[in-house]
């Protein structure tokens, strides 16, 4: 009697975002902490020194962008998505330079900051979506914080364009959420670095493949039972 060969389930593509352990991921923690300190102080100051806070925040953007580019180049051989960080870093430097060197002539500097947070929040959501496919690390906090950043920045931009009121407080809260997100990104990257020590990716692929095959079998059995009783 000839036995039927069991059909193998094709294991889905597993993104090789991380080839080796990342270096210098503490850059994101430091930049996020500085964002929180700067904008946290801005919530309690008078408009007399607001000019200096904006200048410091713009300078932080420039340093932050340079840090992203340095992180990308340092991990170029390890991080297949390094180009995304290069683009984000260049955009961040451009935004910071626009604000820092044109503080007086910008009509509404809040619009520039809010536009940056909106685009950066979308970039972080894309990043979280890619890294979430590793499955062993919880990206929920990072994702939720950046969803809040996108939502708050859109709301504040709508208020600015509608001329309904001041958005300084809303901008400060958006920045603090963004800074917290960058700090959590460092923690998640650190956890991602220990991923090979927890379980090899080959084993995770096999587990993922078995899971798919299991649910396919359940679906087939369900269809067979349904046809039997209908």
Image: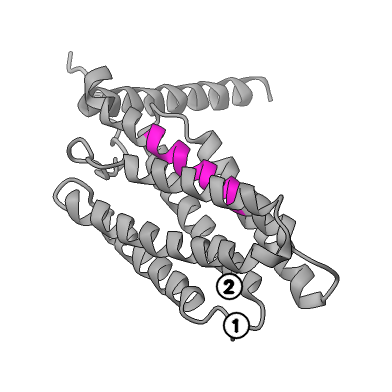
Quadrant location, the N terminus: top left
Q: Residue at x 24, y 43 (%)?
A: 16
What numbered label is drawn on residue 112?
2
Magenta range is 175-188
**Magenta span main SS:** helix
Q: Is residue 176 above or below residue 189?
A: below
Q: Reply yes or no: does residue 179 show up in magenta.
A: yes
Q: Position of residue 49 (x, y in %)?
A: 64, 63
Secondary structure at badge 2 equals helix
- Toward the bottom, the furthest residue is 105
Tell me, yes or no, whether the two marked residues, 2 and 1, touch with CB atoms within 8 Å: yes
Q: Nearer the viewer, mark 2 or mark 1?
A: 1
Q: Residue at x 53, y 66 (%)?
A: 116
Q: Residue at x 40, y 32 (%)?
A: 187
- Toward the front, the furthest residue is 48
Distance from disc 2 to disc 1, alpha carbons, whole Å, reads 9 Å
Q: Position of residue 129 (x, y in %)?
A: 45, 46
Q: Position of residue 8 (x, y in %)?
A: 26, 30
**Which residue is identified by label 1?**
106
Label 2 Cα crowd, 10 Å radius (few <14 / some 14-19 / many 20+): some
Q: Residue at x 28, y 60 (%)?
A: 69
Which color scheme is applied? Answer: one colour
First along the sequence among labels 2 and 1: 1
């Amino acid at each position: 009697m000839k036995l039927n060969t069991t059909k193998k389930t094709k294991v889905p593509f597993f993104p090789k975002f991380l080839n080796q352990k990342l270096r210098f991921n503490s850059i994101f923690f430091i930049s996020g902490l500085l964002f929180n300190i700067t904008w946290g102080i801005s919530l309690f100051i008078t408009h007399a020194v607001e000019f200096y806070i904006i200048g410091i925040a713009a300078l932080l953007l420039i340093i932050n962008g340079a840090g992203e580019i340095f992180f990308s180049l340092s991990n170029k051989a390890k991080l297949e998505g390094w180009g995304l960080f290069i683009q984000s870093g260049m955009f961040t430097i451009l935004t910071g330079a626009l604000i820092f060197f044109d503080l007086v002539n910008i009509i509404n500097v809040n619009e520039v900051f809010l536009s940056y947070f909106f685009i950066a929040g979308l970039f972080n959501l894309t990043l979280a979506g890619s890294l979430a496919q590793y499955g062993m690390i919880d990206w929920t906090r990072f994702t939720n914080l950046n969803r809040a950043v996108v939502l708050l920045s859109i709301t504040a931009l709508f208020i600015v364009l509608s001329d309904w009121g001041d958005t300084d407080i809303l901008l400060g809260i958006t920045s603090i959420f963004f800074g917290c997100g960058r700090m959590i990104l460092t923690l998640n990257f650190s956890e991602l670095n220990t991923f090979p020590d927890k379980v090899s990716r080959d084993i995770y692929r096999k587990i993922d493949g078995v899971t798919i095959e299991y649910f396919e079998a359940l679906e087939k059995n369900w269809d067979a039972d349904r046809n039997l009783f209908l």
